[in-house]
Image (cartoon, rainbow, N blue to C red):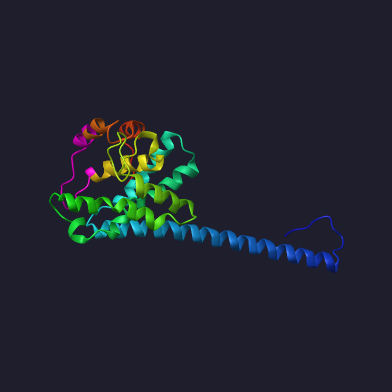
Amino acid sequence: LHLSGISQVSDLDQSLIQLFNRNVSIAFDNIHLHNEIEETQREIVYMLGEAVETRSRETGNHVKRVAEISKLLALEIGLAEDEAEIVRLASPLHDVGKIGIPDHILNKPGKHTTEEWEIMQTHAALGHEMLKTSKKRILRAGADIALEHHEKWNGRGYPFGKKEDEIALVGRITAVADVFDALGSDRCYKKAWPVDKIIDLLKAERGEHLDPAPVDILLANMDKDVN
């Protein structure tokens, strides 16, 4: 603290200046602590997403790519920077409910039976139950994404059969990012699709499974690097 134009500083003034300095120091410490807490939250979100990814034998940083694609879509669709960042940070939690799915169903290489598929579908509600009580913006958005990223634009998705704008925007955005990256990645039940086949499917599912707006944005930004 630099003072100029003052010929004399009283003992009281010195005490007040020292008190001011201590308060400023405490404020900076609090800011640093707040930033550390936020960074810890981000790391925990990624760790949860990656834990699910590892358990379901998915590789190649799927959750990180979904996060970056989701933010790109959110920005292009008109969300503010801070809102798009929340989407980026929350989208890795889209499949967190798979933690509650038995291994023999989660990693089954062939087609699920009707009973197995019903159990598999519960991961959406399980993820929502895990996150819904949080008061943190990231986890609240994660709860919405976990619950609704398997809803479909035409109302034929799960768990509630919501359609169009009934589905949370964060869920619709993450659904497009998830479908795109999942198709382009090896899974226990399939090999990665070539890009031209993925584009054909996105066009076919535009307005059916997927919200047309983020599909159009993704197709227009296929050259963007999100790795």
- Which quarter of the rendered picture does the N terminus lie within? bottom right
Q: Residue furthest left?
A: 110
Q: Is residue 195 magenta-colored?
A: yes
x then y, percent, for residue 62: 29, 50
Residue 150 x, y percent position in the rendering = 30, 44
Q: Is residue 138 left or right of residue 160?
A: right
Magenta span has 137? Answer: no
> Quadrant location of residue 218?
top left
* Front-most of residues 165 and 212: 165
Q: How many marks?
A: 0
Q: Which residues are magenta?
A: 183-200
Residue 46 rendering spot, x and y as whole percentages: 37, 56
Residue 142 % position (x, y):
40, 51
Residue at position x 40%, y 60% in the image: 44
Is residue 123 rendered to the left or right of residue 42? left
> Does residue 62 lie above or below 197 as drawn?
below
Please report the residue visible at 67 percent of the width from the left and 61 percent of the height from the top: 24
Q: Is residue 200 left or right of residue 91?
A: left
Drawn side of residue 123 relative to residue 15, left or right: left
- At horizontal 41% and vertical 34% (from top left) the residue drawn is 76
Q: Is residue 22 above or below residue 109?
A: below
Magenta highlight: main SS: loop
Q: Is residue 129 above or below residue 155?
A: below
Q: Quadrant of residue 203?
A: top left
